[in-house]
Image (cartoon, rainbow, N blue to C red):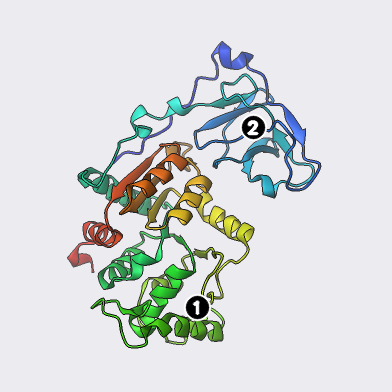
C-alpha cells in the first residue's frame, strides 16, 4: 500500500503572503496560559512566524501552540512555564497567522463510515495489516492501547506474544489490570482466578491476582519478577524481554498496584505522550478511558524522514458501538477506523494474517 501523503498549500500565493504572523503572549505563571490562546486540533495546522509557515512535528487535541527556538511546539497547558510564548487567537483560517489545512489529506480520510455490528470489516483488516507491515518495514512506531479483557484468553495471549516477537509492537499503554492479569496468567495460569484456557473458575481463584501483585511487589519490579523465572509466558513477559516500553496509568482504585504503575495522573499522561508523539499507528482494544485519552494525546499526523506528512491511523476495536464512536469523535473523524467485534477474535485474526505458520 501507499501512504496517503499530505499536500501542503502553495504558500507562494498572495493570499498566504498577505496573512499576518501569529500574535504571541508570554506565560507569567507556570501552568496558566494567557487569556485568548489558540486551542489546537488534530488537523494539520500551520503557524506563520517571521513570514514563514511552520507545521509542528506533532500535534495534540485541546493544547496550546508555543514558539520555541523559531519553531512551534504543542504543549498541554499544565506543562507551560513562565516565559513560554503562546500563540493567541481563535480563528483557524489564517487571519491570525494560524491556518488549519485539513484539505491537504484526501476527503476519504475524514469520512464517517458509520460502522455497526452488522458491517463487514474485511477491508479494514486488510488496511490494518498493510499498515502494520509497512510500519515494521520502515521503522514505524506501533502503539497498542489495551484493556484487561484482551489477556483473559489463551489464544489471544499467544497471538499478542507472536506479534510482539515479530516486530509489530513498539509500545503498550494500559492500566494496572492489563499487566496484572497477564502476569497472573504466566504465574498461576489464571486471569482474575479463571483458567485462561478452560475459562473455568479455580478454587480460591479470587486470591490469585492479589497473590501475583504481592509477589511482584516483593520482587520490586516486573522485570525482576520475570528475570527470577516466575513468569512462564505472556505478553508482558515478551515486552519486558524485548525492552519494549510499557506505560501503566493508574486509576482511582487499583489493587496493588504493580510497582511500575503511575499513580500520579500528570506523570502518567506525560509518559503516554512520550510514546504517542512517536506513534505512526495506534491500535486500541477494549478500554474506553485509555483509548479516549490516547485519541486526544496522539498526533493526527507524523512527519517522515523524507519530509512527507502522513496520517497517524487509529484503530479502535470494541464490542460496543458507542465506545468506538466516542473515540472517533475524539480523533475528529480523521484517520480513525472502527471494528465492532470481540477483541479476542480481532487479535487472533491479525496474528494469522501477519504471521504465517512457516514463519513461526
Q: Quadrant of residue 230?
A: bottom left
Q: Position of residue 223 (x, y in %)?
A: 50, 78
Mark 1 to mark 2: distance in Å? 43 Å
| In this view, the mark in front (1 or 2) | 2
Quadrant in the picture for the C terminus: bottom left
Determine whether, in the image, residue 75 is placed left or right of residue 146. right
**Crowding near pointer 1: few (<14 within 10 Å), some, many (20+)?**
some
Taking depth in this image into account, of 249 and 81 the one nearest to the observer is 249
Label 2 secondary element: loop
Report the residue marked by disc 2: 38
Considering only order in the chain, which callout, 2 or 1, is on the residue closer to the N terminus? 2
The vertical placement of 103 against 192, above or below, is: above
Q: How many marks?
A: 2
User: Mark 1 highlights which residue?
Assistant: 223
Residue at point 57% right, 82% down? 220
Q: Is residue 151 above or below residue 78?
A: below
Q: Quadrant of the N terminus?
A: top left
Amino acid at each position: 500500500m501507499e501512504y496517503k501523503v499530505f499536500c501542503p498549500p502553495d504558500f507562494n500565493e498572495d493570499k498566504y503572503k498577505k496573512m499576518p504572523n501569529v500574535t504571541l503572549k508570554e506565560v507569567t505563571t507556570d501552568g496558566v496560559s494567557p487569556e485568548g490562546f489558540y486551542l489546537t486540533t488534530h488537523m494539520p495546522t500551520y503557524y506563520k512566524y517571521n513570514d514563514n509557515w511552520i507545521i509542528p512535528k506533532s500535534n495534540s487535541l485541546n493544547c496550546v501552540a508555543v514558539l520555541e527556538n523559531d519553531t512551534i511546539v504543542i504543549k498541554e497547558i499544565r506543562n507551560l512555564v513562565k516565559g513560554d510564548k503562546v500563540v493567541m487567537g481563535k480563528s483557524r483560517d489564517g487571519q491570525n497567522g494560524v491556518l488549519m489545512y485539513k484539505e491537504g489529506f484526501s476527503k476519504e480520510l475524514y469520512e464517517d463510515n458509520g460502522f455497526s455490528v452488522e458491517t463487514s470489516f474485511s477491508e479494514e483488516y486488510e488496511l490494518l495489516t498493510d499498515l502494520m507491515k509497512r510500519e515494521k518495514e520502515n521503522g514505524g512506531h506501533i502503539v497498542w492501547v489495551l484493556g484487561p479483557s484482551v489477556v483473559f484468553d489463551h489464544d489471544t495471549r499467544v497471538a499478542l506474544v507472536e506479534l510482539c516477537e515479530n516486530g509489530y509492537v513498539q509500545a503498550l499503554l494500559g492500566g494496572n489490570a492489563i499487566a496484572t492479569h497477564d502476569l497472573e496468567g504466566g504465574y498461576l495460569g489464571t486471569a482474575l482466578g479463571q483458567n485462561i484456557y478452560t475459562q473455568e473458575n479455580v478454587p480460591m481463584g479470587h486470591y490469585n491476582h492479589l497473590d501475583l501483585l504481592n509477589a511482584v511487589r516483593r520482587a520490586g519490579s516486573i522485570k525482576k519478577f520475570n528475570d527470577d523465572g516466575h513468569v512462564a509466558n505472556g505478553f508482558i513477559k515478551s515486552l519486558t524481554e524485548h525492552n519494549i516500553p510499557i506505560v501503566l496509568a493508574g486509576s482511582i482504585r487499583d489493587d496493588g498496584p504493580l510497582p511500575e504503575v503511575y499513580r500520579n495522573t500528570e506523570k502518567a499522561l506525560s509518559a503516554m505522550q512520550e510514546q504517542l508523539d512517536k506513534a505512526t499507528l495506534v491500535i486500541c482494544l477494549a478500554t474506553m478511558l485509555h483509548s479516549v485519552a490516547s485519541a486526544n494525546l496522539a498526533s493526527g499526523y507524523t512527519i517522515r524522514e523524507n519530509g512527507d506528512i502522513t496520517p497517524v491511523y487509529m484503530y479502535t476495536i470494541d464490542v460496543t458501538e458507542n465506545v468506538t464512536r466516542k473515540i472517533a469523535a475524539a480523533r475528529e473523524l480523521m484517520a480513525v477506523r472502527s471494528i465492532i467485534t470481540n477483541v479476542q477474535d480481532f487479535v487472533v485474526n491479525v496474528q494469522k494474517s501477519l504471521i504465517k505458520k512457516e514463519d513461526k
